[in-house]
Structures are given as C-alpha cells and as structure tokens.
Image (spheres, helix red, strand yellow):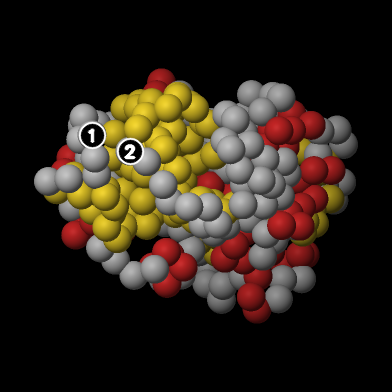
Amino acid sequence: MNPGSYYLYEYESCCRRRNLGFLQISSHNYSYLLTLHVKNLPIVPGEQLEVHAFILENQTLTGSPVALLQCSGQNLSTQLVISGERFPHKRTLKHIDGFIIFSITQNRSQHWIASAVPLPDFYSFSDCSLSTEESLSSGPENPSLSEESLITEDTVSETVSEAALSDASIDTASTKEVATEVTPTEETPTEDASIQARKITHAEISTLPRRFWPLANNSFLLHGCHNYHHLLLIKEKDHLWLGVPGLYDPREAHMANLFGFPQFTSSYISILELTEDECENSESFGHWCRYLM
C-alpha cells in the first residue's frame, strides 16, 4: 500500500455493496496519518468500530488492530496517528494491503474495506495479534472518546473539519521549522495581565464558536487530552488560543505543526494549578497552541 487515497466500500458476506467514503494515508517519520471520511454507516450512535490493517495471504485477510473508534452518528470524519509497530507482523506500509473496519457489536459478515489490491470472491479474516482492547491499551495514540465528551458527527459534518488536512497542507507542514517557544505576534498569546488562561475539558470545546467544534476530533488534541486530562484556553480581549498539553520534542513539534498546533509555550503552567496527573515534572512540559480568533 502506498500513501494516498482509497475508496472505502461496504461488504456483506464477501460481496461489495456500496461506496461509503474514503480513507487517506500519509507517512511521517515512524508513524502514519490515517484520515477517514465516511457517510451513512449502518450503525447506532455510541457504537464502537475496530480498525485493522491487513495483508492478503491466499484467501485470508490477516490483520491486526490499529485503532478503536467510538461513533456518535452515522457520519464519521476523523484522523488517527498510528505506529507501524501495530501493522501485521510489524510490516511497513509498503507491505500492507489495506484496512478493514468492523463493528464490535455487529456480525463481522458486514464490514468496510479500503484495499490496495483486488480481493478474492471469497475470503476470511484472521487476527494475528492480541484482542483489540489489549493491543491498543499498550499505547495512548488513539484514545477513544468518552460518551460525555463526544460532539456528534452529524454536527461536525455540517462544517468543514479543521482537523482534515489536504495533501498540500501536509507537504507544507512537513517543511516548516517549529519554534521551541511561542514568540509574540498578533496571532500568538503574549504574557500580559489582561490575558486570561484556564483549564477546560474536552467537552467544553462545544462552548467555543461552532466553526471550532471539529477540533474535538483532532487526533493530536485527543492524544494530549487523554494523557493530561485537560486543555488550555487563552483569552485576550476578543482573541482566543487553544492549547494542548505535552512535552517539547523535535518529533512532537513536527506532529503538532502537522495537526495545526505549531506554537509551544510553558508560560501558563504556574497559573493553571495543575494536578500530578495533568502535567509532567519536566522543564520541557508545556502547551502546543493554535490561534483561533
């Protein structure tokens, strides 16, 4: 499988039924950015989906789980950052044949596949790893959304998702250098007494203007919020910035920039009164920020 876009088809007992959307995958250092845009999934709100990478061996799709998604509606628009370590037999993307998605609660005879190779008329599926929950619990790359913090996919689909990146924006982001600290400009928060900075929860993203709601599905934001249980909201007059907690690291800087949080600052840690599970005892801890308005 090469980086690019692939149609996602619904299958019933090995028969292809209809196209539901597409899957886009791109490679970045030792990880992969998986973008899913799907409409009219035959599922109920709150249903969980398993995403598996697979290789085709004879007439068997040999797969391993790479992500667990919780859907709040029949339309899905999300991004996942996954490690090649999760691929079957730890193969590289080049040696992966596709991705298959199952519902946890429904019969596996109905599933959805994005494939780089033609599928045989009859095939079976074999899981070559641990169970999905055991496998994915080993790392917080793609934490599933809690029910109380979900913003419905139907709501998100009404506006263009800011989490969705085009190929052009990915290429641009990968060539940019990211500063180690926020530098004051008209679009970056500055240290001033008039600035209000506070912790917010993932659910409080819904209190922001509607056009920012798609950020609730941003994988980088979900990753930071899962690890440190908060987000940073900075307000100065009529301007807003949103911050994701994390540690500064060159590779992390690249991913933050890729997902739209290019500015790093540790200026607000002292006033947030963070608990032990909301921060790290490290000089490199801070927040990756993006200007909202």
Question: Image quadrant for the N terminus?
Answer: top left
Work out whether 238 lies above or below 58: above
Question: How far apart are the alpha carbons under marks 2 and 1?
Answer: 7 Å
Work out whether 138 lies above or below 39: below
- The residue that label 2 is drawn on is 14
Residue at 14% x, 48% y: name it.
57
Residue at 87% x, 36% y: name it.
237
Provide residue 269's location: percent of width, then percent of height.
69, 64
- Give the numbered dot on residue 38: none
Residue 255 lies in quadrant: top left
Q: Secondary structure at mark 1?
A: loop
Q: Are marks 2 and 1 in contact (CB under 8 Å)?
A: yes
Query: How crowded is the residue under tag 2: few (<14 C-alpha within 10 Å), some, or many (20+)?
Result: some
Q: Secondary structure at mark 2?
A: loop
Q: Depth check: 36 or 181 in front?
A: 36
- The residue that label 1 is drawn on is 121
Query: How crowded is the residue under tag 1: few (<14 C-alpha within 10 Å), some, or many (20+)?
Result: few
Provide residue 161's location: percent of width, then percent of height.
62, 29
For residue 233, side relative to residue 42 (left or right):
right
Question: Image quadrant for the C terminus?
Answer: top right
Amino acid type at image mark 2: Cys
Amino acid type at image mark 1: Asp
Residue at 87% x, 46% y: name it.
194
Residue extending furthest top?
168
Residue extending furthest left?
58
Q: Is residue 243 visible?
A: no
Residue 113 lies in quadrant: top left
Provide residue 118's location: percent of width, then percent of height.
21, 30
